[in-house]
Image: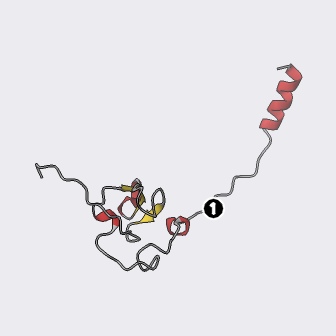
Amino acid sequence: MSEEKRREWLKQARKPRAPTPVVPVSLDAACIKLPQDYEGYGSQKRVGCDCSWGCRFWWPLEGAASGDWGVCLNPASHRVGLLTFEHQGCLKFEPEERSSNE
């Protein structure tokens, strides 16, 4: 890079920039709700357990949201790959496998 180009680059790099706006988004606002979700989120009557009650396909988020929010990894579920609130549920709940030592 020539000295002239380097100076121009430094001049541009040092220019003040407007801060990037931070738009707070709640998990509830980001969560897609589908008709197949349990009542309160969709139109499916609640049957059985919620996702966080030990579904083997439930992948909880880390941090403060880990108790209520996760992602469904069940390829048979309508919520596969989606951010999910624990009570949205689905009919594809499968309990975690327990070892014989438990």
Q: Name the spot of residue 63 as percent of width and height, x first.
A: 40, 55
- The residue closer to the viewer here, 94 or 25, is 94
Q: Residues within 10 Å of mark 1 (few under 14, many from 20)?
A: few
Q: Which residue is mark 1?
A: 23
Q: Name the spot of residue 88 as percent of width and height, x first.
A: 41, 71
At a point 78% along the width and 45% down the height, the residue shown is 16
Q: Name the spot of residue 26 as percent of width and height, x first.
A: 53, 66
Q: Residue placed farthest to the top in the image? A: 2
Q: Residue placed farthest to the front in the image? A: 76
Quadrant assignment, res 40: bottom left
At a point 59% along the width and 63% down the height, the residue shown is 24
Q: Is residue 7 above or below residue 14?
A: above
- The residue closer to the viewer here, 46 or 75, is 75
Q: In the image, 66: left or right of 94?
A: right
User: In what element is the residue under mark 1?
Assistant: loop
- The residue closer to the viewer here, 83 or 6, is 83
Q: Name the spot of residue 22 as percent of width and height, x first.
A: 64, 58
Q: In the image, 34: left or right of 59?
A: right
Q: In the image, 40: left or right of 2?
A: left
Q: Residue placed farthest to the left in the image? A: 101
Amino acid marked by disc 1: Val
What scheme was used to colour the molecule? secondary structure
